[in-house]
Structures are given as structure tokens and as C-alpha cells.
């Protein structure tokens, strides 16, 4: 069992070892007709298959059980969180974000304190902090079309992803410094367990080498898949969960390399001054229940943080769970990003435009 402080210092690998398993700028908003007798809340999450999985696994059951109406807004944006809080006009309640964004928001004071007594603490492999609730663990890596690029013709790890001579073609990377900088350093030969503190200058030098081959700095996660499907990208930095979901939908030639992955935690947090704080807290408690974690992660294809949920997962999704292997895979250090995200994100955005 991890303590709260340990969450932001990186996740203990043994706690995630798979061997132990016996709206503001035209956002997409999902509006369904459900009873509103129990209140309402606005939940900022992600689009595409992720949106659909969270809607089916969490949002609709939550609305049915509580009567609280949930409006989903796609694509979390920390800059919009800051703008809402500074203006005193907070429209969002609940925020779903990867560790670096969540930890940065915590450092900046963007989140409300959580009532952790309402969470199933004894069942969680990762403990919440005072303002962040762990949601799941996910794996980022290389997606490709196996028909176009059979074995031997596609990159299997990040070093090969950056080798555009051996594996020519257009690529994608995320339009944010977190994950992207780690991938660049891993590609340059930094050992996964020696990543932090990140060598920023070295990482940007490595990114310079691949910049001409990047077709898209991806903002919306669904594009990591659609750009491959459309033939605009030959290879894509995506997520095992997204690739498996695309494969399961049928008729899609796509695969994911587990040759090397970058793993990270996703968190839920409540905006400071959120108009529906109580409803948001109810949702977090609901989302961490074993039954909800299992159903949602069977759809999302990510690793639940509620250990009881592991025994409820479908056999079909188990091979797609993130593998914490210190020999080849890396784990994002949220504490490091909490101290460094804001200035490096500005530098990264300026670099992409240069």
C-alpha cells in the first residue's frame, strides 16, 4: 500500500506488478436526458473511445444511481482551469488529467481538498493525496498498421521511433511537454530508471532530430488513432488502451508495440470554487468502487487502482494492461513535473512553433 506522499514521487513498481493478479472552445458535450433531482456537475474528460467508455462505465450508472445529472466536456485544459479560477467564474467541477497536469494544478492550488474518508482506501494500490484521487494506470507507446508495416518494418521502442532513416515515415507526438520529453530521452538511450531529473537540453536536442517527421503535435488523444487510420501518419505515439479499443471495434488494421512503454497515472480532481463540489466528491467515491473500476477499465482497457477490481477484469483485456518493467519501461514522475511543468510547457509550445 502506497502512502499519499509516494504518489507524487512515482508509483512503487511492485504495487503495479501484473504477476500479482490471481467548454469552452467548442468542446464536445454529451447531454443525455436523465433525472436531475439529485443535482448536477460538469465533468471534464477526454474524447473519442475514452469518452464513450467513461460515459457507459461511470457516468450513466452514476446518474441512474444518484439522480445527479452529469455534463461531459472533452479535452482537459489546465490553462482554462486557471482562467476560470482567476476570473472567479468556475464552470467546471471535476477534472480528469494525467499526473503531470494534475500535480501541477495541485502545486498551483487549483483543486479543492478531498474528503478521503469517503474513498475505499484499503482497496487502493495508490493512495490519494489531499486533493488528487488516482483513477487508473495507462501505457503510452507506438501504434502502427501491421498490414502496411509488418514485423521488422515498424519501430518497436522509442529509440527506433526516432530512427527515421531505418523506419522512414511520418509520426505523431503529443502537443505537451510531459510524455514527449520522456520519450525523447528514452529514444536517446537514457535508462528508464535514470530518467529523473530530466535532462531538458538533451531532450530538446533529440526532439530537434525528429521534428521534420512529425505530421501532427496531437492535442486530442483520438487523433493518435484517426491519423493512422486516415493514412496521414505512418506511426503514432498512442496508448495501448486506445489501440485495443480500435481493434475491438472491428475492421481496423492497427497494433501496439509493447517493446517499450511510458506508463503514468491518471487522476480525478475537483476545481477550487467548483459550484457542485459535493456532487463531484460523490462521483469520485463512485469511480473508485471496485465494481465501477472493473466495468470502466474493461471498456477503457487501463489498469484499475482498486485492487479488488483486478479479479473482475475480462480475460480479453488483461494482456493489454500496463507492464511496469524497470528493464525497459518508464514511469512518469509527477512530483518532478509539479515543479517544472509550467515553464517547460511554455518552452515546448514556443519550440513547436519555431
Image: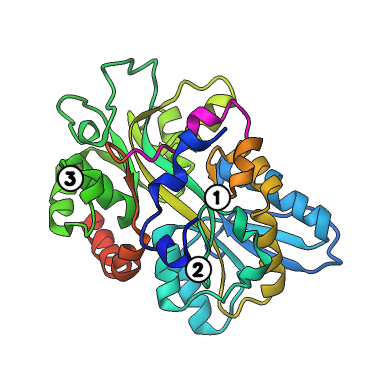
Q: Nearer the viewer, mark 3 or mark 2?
A: 2
When the figure is inspected, residue 229 is found, relative to residue 132, above or below; the finding is above
Q: Is residue 332 toward the left or the right of residue 246 in the image?
A: left
Q: Which mark is residue 268?
A: none
Question: Dot 3: few (<14), some (14–19), or many (≥20) neighbours within 10 Å?
Answer: some
- Relative to 245, 150 lies left or right: left
Magenta region's main secondary structure? loop
Q: Nearer the viewer, residue 45 or 314?
A: 314
Label 2 element class: loop
Instruction: State the image coordinates of residue 245 (x, y, percent, origin top left).
Output: 55, 32
Foreground disc of the pair 3, 1: 1
Which residue does the numbered mark 3 point to in the structure image? 190
Residue 278 in sight: yes
> Which image quadrant: the C terminus?
bottom left
Spatial CA distance of label 3 from label 1 is: 28 Å
For residue 305, the mark is 1
Secondary structure of residue under mark 1? loop
Q: Distance between the residues labelled 2 and 1?
A: 14 Å
> Residue 162 placed where, x, y %?
20, 36
Residue position for label 2: 129
- Report the residue at 20% width, 44% height from top: 191
Chain part drawn in magenta: 313-325
Residue 314 colored magenta? yes
The residue shown at (57%, 54%) is 124
Compared with 244, 331 (above or below) is below
Label 2 neighbourhood size at 10 Å, few (<14), some (14-19), many (20+)?
some
Query: Horizontal and vertical percent for residue 32?
Result: 77, 52
Callout 3: helix, strand or loop? loop
Amino acid at each position: 500500500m502506497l502512502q499519499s506522499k509516494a504518489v507524487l514521487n512515482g508509483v512503487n513498481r511492485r504495487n503495479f506488478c501484473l504477476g500479482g493478479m490471481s467548454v469552452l472552445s467548442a468542446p464536445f458535450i454529451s447531454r443525455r436526458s436523465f433525472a436531475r433531482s439529485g443535482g448536477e456537475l460538469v465533468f471534464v474528460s477526454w474524447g473519442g473511445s475514452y469518452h464513450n467508455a467513461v460515459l457507459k462505465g461511470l457516468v450513466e450508472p452514476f446518474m441512474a444511481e444518484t439522480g445527479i445529472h452529469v455534463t461531459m466536456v472533452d479535452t482537459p485544459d489546465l490553462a482554462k482551469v486557471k482562467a476560470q479560477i482567476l476570473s472567479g467564474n468556475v464552470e467546471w467541477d471535476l477534472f480528469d488529467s494525467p499526473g503531470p497536469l494534475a500535480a501541477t494544478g495541485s502545486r498551483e492550488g487549483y483543486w479543492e481538498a478531498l474528503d478521503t474518508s469517503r474513498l475505499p482506501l484499503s482497496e487502493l494500490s495508490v493512495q490519494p493525496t489531499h486533493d488528487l484521487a488516482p483513477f487508473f494506470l495507462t501505457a503510452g507507446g507506438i501504434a502502427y498498421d501491421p498490414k502496411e508495416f509488418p514485423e521488422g518494418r515498424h519501430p518497436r521502442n522509442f529509440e527506433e521511433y526516432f530512427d527515421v532513416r531505418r523506419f522512414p515515415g511520418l509520426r505523431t507526438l503529443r502537443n505537451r511537454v510531459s510524455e514527449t520529453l520522456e520519450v525523447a530521452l528514452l529514444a536517446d538511450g537514457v535508462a528508464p530508471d535514470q530518467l529523473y531529473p530530466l535532462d531538458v537540453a538533451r531532450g530538446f536536442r533529440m526532439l530537434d532530430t525528429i521534428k521534420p517527421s512529425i505530421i501532427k503535435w496531437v492535442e486530442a488523444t483520438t487523433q493518435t488513432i484517426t491519423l493512422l487510420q486516415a493514412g496521414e501518419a505512418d506511426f503514432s505515439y498512442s496508448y495501448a488502451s486506445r489501440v485495443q479499443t480500435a481493434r475491438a471495434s472491428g475492421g481496423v488494421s492497427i497494433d501496439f508495440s509493447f517493446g517499450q512503454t511510458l506508463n503514468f497515472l491518471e487522476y480525478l480532481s475537483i476545481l477550487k470554487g467548483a459550484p457542485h463540489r459535493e456532487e463531484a466528491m460523490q462521483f469520485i467515491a463512485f469511480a473508485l468502487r471496485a465494481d465501477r473500476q472493473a466495468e470502466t477499465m474493461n471498456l477503457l482497457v487501463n489498469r484499475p487502482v482498486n485492487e479488488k477490481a483486478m479479479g473482475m477484469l475480462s480475460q480479453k483485456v488483461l494482456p493489454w494492461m500496463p507492464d511496469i518493467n524497470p528493464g525497459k519501461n518508464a514511469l512518469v514522475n509527477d512530483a518532478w513535473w509539479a515543479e517544472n511543468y509550467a515553464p517547460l510547457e511554455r518552452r515546448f509550445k514556443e519550440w513547436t512553433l519555431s
